[in-house]
Image (tube, rainbow, N blue to C red):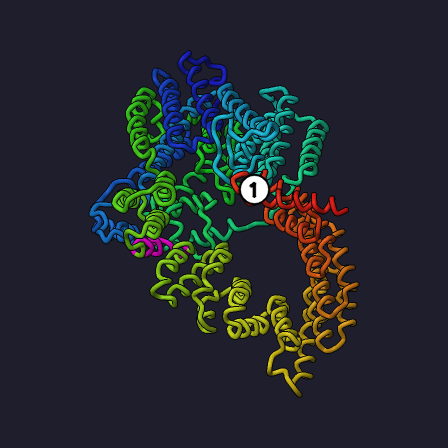
Amino acid sequence: MTTTGSEGRAGSSPMTRASRWVLAVAIAGSALAVGTVHTITLCIVTAVLAVAAVMAWWGAEPMKARSAATLLLFTGIGLTAYTALQCVPMPIGWLAVIAPHNADVWSRALSPLHEPGPSWAPISLDPTATRVEVLKGVAYLLAFVTALRVARKREGVRFLSAAIVVTAIALALAALLHPAFGAKKLFGLYEPSAGILDRHIAPLINPNNLAGYINVAICLSLAALLAPEPSVPRPIAGAAVVVLGAVQVWVGSRGGVIAMVFGAITVIGIARITRARHSGTVPGLALAAGAMFAVGTALFVLSGSDEVSNELLDTDVSKLHLLGTMFRSVPAMPFLGCGRGSFESVFPAFRIEPGYVTYTHPENFAAQWVVEWGLPIGIVGLIAVAFALRPNVVLARSTTAGGAWAAIAAMTVQNMGDLGSEVPGLVLPCVICAAIVVAGTPGNKSRKLVDRWAGRPRAIALCVATTVPIAILLAVGVVGRELNDDQNTLHQMALVERTSAIEMRTAARAAMKRHPSEPYLPFAAALRAARDRDEDPIPWLGGVIERSREYGPAHLLLARVVSARSPSQARLEYRLAMEQAPNLVASIMAEAPRMVTGYFGALELLPSGKENGAVSELLAQAVDDRLPATRFRLDAEVMERLPAATGPAWRMARDAVQDIEADGGAPWCDGSAREGCVHDALDKSIKLERMAPDKCAGHMLHARARAAEGDAAGGVAELGKAVDDVVDRPWCLEQLVALARQHGNEPRAEAALEKIVTIGCGDEVTCAEHLRWVGQQYEAMGKPHRALTLFRRAFQQVPDDNLLAHMAELAASGGLHAEAAADYEQLAHRHPEDDQWRHQAAVQHDAAMQQAIKL
C-alpha cells in the first residue's frame, strides 16, 4: 500500500515549490499555444519542462519509486531511444537486410532525377519528422519525472489537478469567446489554416483535441466532487463539472462525448470502491441533482445549436476505413516500422480508396505505434504501459488518483478513433495524470535495484541538463524543412513563382531526400515542368505514381502531357484520374471529350464504379452535336444499365420528336414509316414525362409530338396546362411561346409571354434576362413599342450598353426620336471617347425637332 499521509504533511524546499509553478506554466502554455504542434513552440515548452525537472530534482532528498513508475519511465526512455535510433543513417545494404521496404523507398528517392538514392539511409522514411518525435518523447519524460516528484505528496496532487482543470477552463472560455466575438485569428495573432470553421477557433483548434483536454479536467473535477474528503469545496468542483460538461457538448465531438460518459462512469466506479474502504459518504441527493443539472445543461446546449447537433449526429465513419488502409502497410514494414512521425508521407503508398484525402495520423494511437515503431516495439510498449497503469495501481493510492486514472482511460477510449496523442499540449496532461497514478512510495517492502533510480536526484538533474539541449538542437535543425514546409515551398515554386528548371530540381532533390516517400514533392515539380515546358514532366510523374497507388491529379496531368502525341494514352489517363479522384470529373469532362473520335474511344474514357453513369451523361452531352451516332450508342448502354436515367431518355425522346417534325424530319420517317416514327416519338416522350413529371422536358416533347402528328391545338393546350405543375416554369413558358408561335396561335403565345413577365425570379439578373427574352419575342412579332417597354425594364434591372444601343435603335426606327436621343446621350455620357454616340444623339434631336414642327 502506498504511504502518502506523512509525505503529504512534510514540507518542501522553495526550489521544489517553484518547480511546481514552472511545470504548471509548461502545462498551460503547451495547450494555449495551439497545442504546441509547431516545432519552435515544442522547443520552448521542452526547455521550460527541463527547468522544472532540474529544479524539482536538484538538491532534493532521495526517494523510492513504485514499480509502476519505474516501468512507465523506462518504457518511455526505451521508446524515445528507439525513436532516436530510427534517425541514425546506416549503409543501404544493411538497411535492405533489416527493413527491405524502407531500403527500397530510399533507393528510389531520387528516381525522378534519374539519380541513385543515398548510400546511407535511416530506418525512418521521414527523418525530419522523427527527430521532432524524439523531442516530444524527451518532453513527456521531463513532465513525467517532474510530476512524479510533485505528486508524491497530496498537496502536490491537488496542485497538478488544479493546474489541468484551470487550463481546461481557460481553453473552454477561449473556445466560446472567439466565435462569440467573430474572431478570425486565435488571440488576434494566429490565423488557422483554411478549412477551419469559425466556430472552432480555439487554442486547440481540432475539436476532438479540445474535447479530450476537457474530458481530462472533467474526470479530475468529478473525482474531487465525489471524494470522501474533497480537496476543494464540493460546489466549486460541481460547478467545474457542469461548465466543462456543457462546453464538451457544445464542442460537438462525437468521440469526446462518448469518452466523457465513459470517464464519468469510471470515476463513479472508482469512487464507490473507495467509499467502501472509508467511512465518508457523498450526499446522494446532491449528487443526483448535480448530475441532472449537468444533463439538462448539455441537452439545452444541444437543442439550441443546429451546428452542434449536426456535428454530434454526423454518421461519417471514414476513420474506420483508414484503419484498413493502415493495416495494409504493416506487412511491408512489420518489425522496425516506417519511423516515428512518418505516417503522413508513407500513407499514400498504401491508400487504395478513391479521392485524395491526406491523413497525418491513422486516428488510432495503438495502430500508429505499430505502424511507426513496428509490431514488436509497438506491442511491447502498449503492454508495458497498460500493465503499469492497471487498476490495482490506482487503488493502492489515495482517492485523488482515481480521477487521473479515469482521465487516462477516457483519453485512451477517445484516441481509438479521434487521435490526439500526437498533440503535445494534449498529451502532457495525460502524462501528468499517469504520474499522479503511479507516484508515491512503495512502502516498507524490499524493492528491486531497478526501482532505486529515484534515490539519486542529482544524477537525474544532471541527465536532464545534458540530454535536453541535444534533443532541442536536433529538432531546431529541421525547422523550415518539415514535410508541410517543403510542400508549401515547392507549391510556391510550381504555381506562383517563376522558377527555373535547375532551381526546382535543386529544391526537389533536397526535399525528396528528407521525405523520400511523399508523392506531392515530385508532383509539384511535374506541374512546373508542364507549365513552363522546359523539361519533360513524365519522369516526375513516374515518381509520383511510384509513391502513391491513388493519385488522380498525376494521371490528369499526364493525360494533358501526352494528349497531342497519344490520344489513346490520354484517354486511359483521364479515366484513371476520374476513378482515383471523383471530384475531378467535372473539370476532366470539360476537356477529355475532344479526345473522342468514335464510340470505342468514348468507351476508353468511361470509368468503372459509381462514377460511370455521371461520366456517361457528361460525355453524351459533350459529343451530342459532333458525334450523334456515338452519343446514341452511349445513351442506349446507359439506359440498359440505368433505366431511370433521365438524360438519355431526354435525348432519345428529343431525337424521335425531331425525326417527325416538318422542319427537321428524318428521311427514314417518310411515307409508310412515318406512323411508326410518330408512335415512337409519343411513347418516348410519355416515358420521359412519367420519369420526371415535375420537369417540363417530357411535357414539351409530348406536346411537340402531338403537334407534328397534326394535333397542334391539343399539344399547345397540353403544354399550357403542364406549365403550372413544373419546377422549371420560366423555361417551360418559353417552350410554350415557341410552340404556339410555330403553329400560329399568337394569343396563346402572348398570354405565355405575359406570364413570363409577371413570374417571380430569384435575382435581378434573372429578371432582366426574362424581360429581354420576352422583349425579343415581341419585337419578332412586330410589336416594337411593347418590346421597347420591356427592354427598358430590363435595363433598369441590369444596365447594359448593348441593350441601351438596341433600345435607341428601336426607338428611332419606331419614330420615338426623343427617347432615342435620350438613349444616345446616355451612351455618350458612358463612353465619352466614342464620338458616334454624340453624333447619333444630335441626329435624333434634329429628327425630334422636325417631328414637333410637323405636329
* Viewer-nearest residue: 182 or 734: 734
Residue at the image point whose x is 40% and y is 14% from the top = 15
For label 1, the crowd category at 10 Å Cα-Cα, with few meaning under 14, some 14 to 19 and many 20 or more, is: many
Residue 663 figure quarter: bottom right
551 up-or-down from 604: above or below: above
Residue found at x 63% / y 40%: 307
The residue at the point 27 percent across, 42 percent down is 503
**Which quadrant of the figure has residue 489?**
top left
Vertical placement of residue 674 versus 242, above or below: below
Going 63% across and 77% down the picture, which residue do you hit? 665
Determine if the magenta segment contains residue 544.
yes
Residue 103 horizontal/vertical position (percent): 27, 51
Magenta residues, start to end: 539-551
Q: Toward the viewer: 688 or 367?
A: 688
Residue position for label 1: 255
Q: Is residue 168 visible?
A: yes
Asked whether, in this view, residue 294 is left or right of residue 597, the answer is: right
Give the x, y percent position of residue 321.
Answer: 50, 53
Helix, strand or loop for the magenta stretch, by majority? helix
Q: Nearer the viewer, residue 532 or 202?
A: 532
In the rendering, at what x and y percent does residue 235 appear? 66, 22
Q: On the rendered structure, is 488 left or right of 793?
A: left
Secondary structure at badge 1 equals helix
Please state if 249 lies on the left or on the right of 778 as rendered: left
Answer whether residue 51 is magenta in the image. no
